[in-house]
Amino acid sequence: MKIINWEIAEKFARKHPLSRNPLNSWQLTVIEASWQSVTDVRSTFNSMDYTRKGNFLFHLRTHTFRFVARINFAAQTVWLIQVLTHAEYDKMDL
């Protein structure tokens, strides 16, 4: 898979240094994946949620950080929308 908009994660990691390792691990896992469906994503990240608005929500570092992304399976792309702390996530309507 190709990750689009990774700059958001890099900016977040500068502000939240504890997120750097989980973010990098997530990135490597996604780059190596070739998902064809939501089921494939869930087999890689079993704590992933698919929201009512069509976003994928990835939980990192025991739910300390969250990625919000869109996935285009045909194009093999993951569009990173947001990286959030748990507190920021609680205020969102995803």
Image: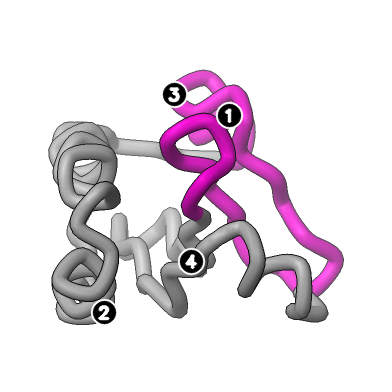
Q: Along the horizontal axis of the image, is 83 left or right of 10?
A: right
> Does the CB distance between marks 1 and 4 fall below 8 Å?
no
**Can you identify the residue that label 1 sits on?**
42
**Can you identify the residue that label 2 sits on?**
8
- 58 in relation to 45, above or below: below
Look at label 3 and name its amino acid. Thr
Mark 2 or mark 4: whose residue is earlier in sequence = 2
- Give whichever of 88, 94 is nearer the camera: 88
> Which residue appears at 81% of the width and 79% of the height?
93
Mark pair 1, 2: CA separation: 23 Å
Mark pair 2, 4: CA separation: 11 Å
**Can you identify the residue that label 4 sits on?**
69
Residue 68 position, x and y percent, is 53, 66
> Does the CB distance between marks 1 and 3 fall below 8 Å?
yes
Mark 1 or mark 2: whose residue is earlier in sequence = 2
Q: Nearer the viewer, mark 1 or mark 2?
A: 2
Assign the C terminus to one quadrant of the image. Answer: bottom right
> Which residue appears at 72% of the width and 51% of the height?
50
Residue 74 position, x and y percent, is 40, 59
> Which residue appears at 60% of the width and 54% of the height?
57
Span highlighted in magenta in the image? 38-65
Mark 4 or mark 3: whose residue is earlier in sequence = 3
